[in-house]
Amino acid sequence: MFIFQWLNSQLLKMEWLYNLVTILVENVFKLDVGSRLGGSIHFFVYDVVKIFILLSVLIFTISYVQSFFPPERTKKILGGYKGLFANTLGAFLGTVTPFCSCSSIPIFIGFTSAGLPIGVTFSFLISSPLVDLASVILLASIFNWEIAIAYVVAGLVLAITAGTIISKSNLEEYVESFVYSNPILEAEQESLATKDRIDFAKEQVKEIITRVWLYILIGVGIGALIHNWIPANIISALLGEDKWYSVLLATLVGIPMYADIFGTLPIAEALVYKGAGIGTVLAFMMGVTALSLPSIIMLSKVIKTRLLLVFIGLVTLGILIIGYAFNAFSYLLL
């Protein structure tokens, strides 16, 4: 137990880094970390460095594993199953693909073109940006393992349930016809050497960091502002877990935004610190990542209005239920 706690505090929460940044702020910048300005600088530097370190290590590891499961192989795996198990498998495969909602849509097109049930592809589409393994580790580093694991379970249940309902609703006719006629390459994946897999993992780290770095900086900046400049009573009055409207408000605010989940985590951290309900901030994160406006616009080009509205309605309802449930039972997790 002691070893686990030490690893958790030093490798995930990076207490060594926290202490180094404290020394930097107090001895180099000559600022008190207890002041607003000093606290903001400390929050920004510490969170940015921590997130980039964890993200790079996690993406490298996940991408190395993912190199054994290229898209064609994934399609073959999913194609061998039907029903609830297929939706569950699609949702779990989504967790090992570190894609944002927009990046997942081309894969959604590929899966549908390959003849996979649309419910399975929607389970993948929901879980991929919502519950990737890197975000789980970062959640544990910011909050705790109980919240991280509960978030994963809730996200997977949402993805599986929404995908199953779509499967049972027989909505295939509401997918644009060109998706089904999209050509699919059936070539076998070449066997990769270890060096090739390492090179692939490095490229994935570079590609994803290049794509999300700005969102991380913006998110951490907003988090530092909330953490040190906005009074706790204001946050609590708007987003406290005792406010019936807080989850609904957070979800509606999150949907029009577009950011990677890694950029929303520092905001969530600051909001919880200031008194917002844990379910409220998780609903905000889910709204941003699973229902961002750009991804909805892209999805509207490949599916018709009725199916799009069903998708948005199911995911929104699921996020609201998850948010209120987390607020109601947060005492078990904190």
Image (spheres, helix red, strand yellow):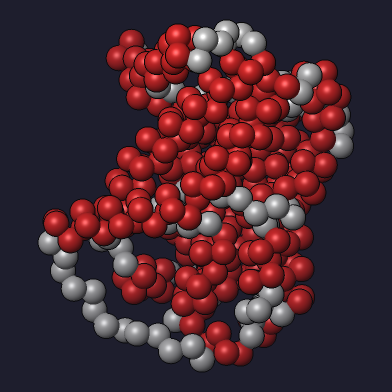
- Please indicate whether residue 104 sits to the left or right of residue 199 in the image: right
- Please indicate whether residue 169 sits to the left or right of residue 201 in the image: right
Determine which quarter of the picture holds residue 172.
bottom right
Determine which quarter of the picture holds residue 290.
bottom right
Q: Which residue sits at x=54%, y=28%?
A: 44
Indicate the position of residue 16 as horizontal and vertical percent values: 37, 16
> 44 or 104: nearer the eye?
44
Determine which quarter of the picture holds residue 327.
top right
> 328 or 283: nearer the eye?
283
Whether 83 is drawn above or below 94: the answer is below
Where, quadrant-wise, is the N terminus in this rendering? Answer: top left
- Please indicate whether residue 273 sits to the left or right of residue 128 in the image: right
Whether 280 is drawn above or below 311: the answer is above
- Please indicate whether residue 198 sits to the left or right of residue 204 in the image: left
Q: Is residue 85 visible?
A: no
Q: Is residue 189 visible?
A: yes
Q: Which residue sits at x=56%, y=22%?
A: 41
Indicate the position of residue 17 as horizontal and vertical percent values: 39, 20
Q: Which residue sits at x=67%, y=16%?
A: 36
Q: Which residue sits at x=74%, y=26%?
A: 276
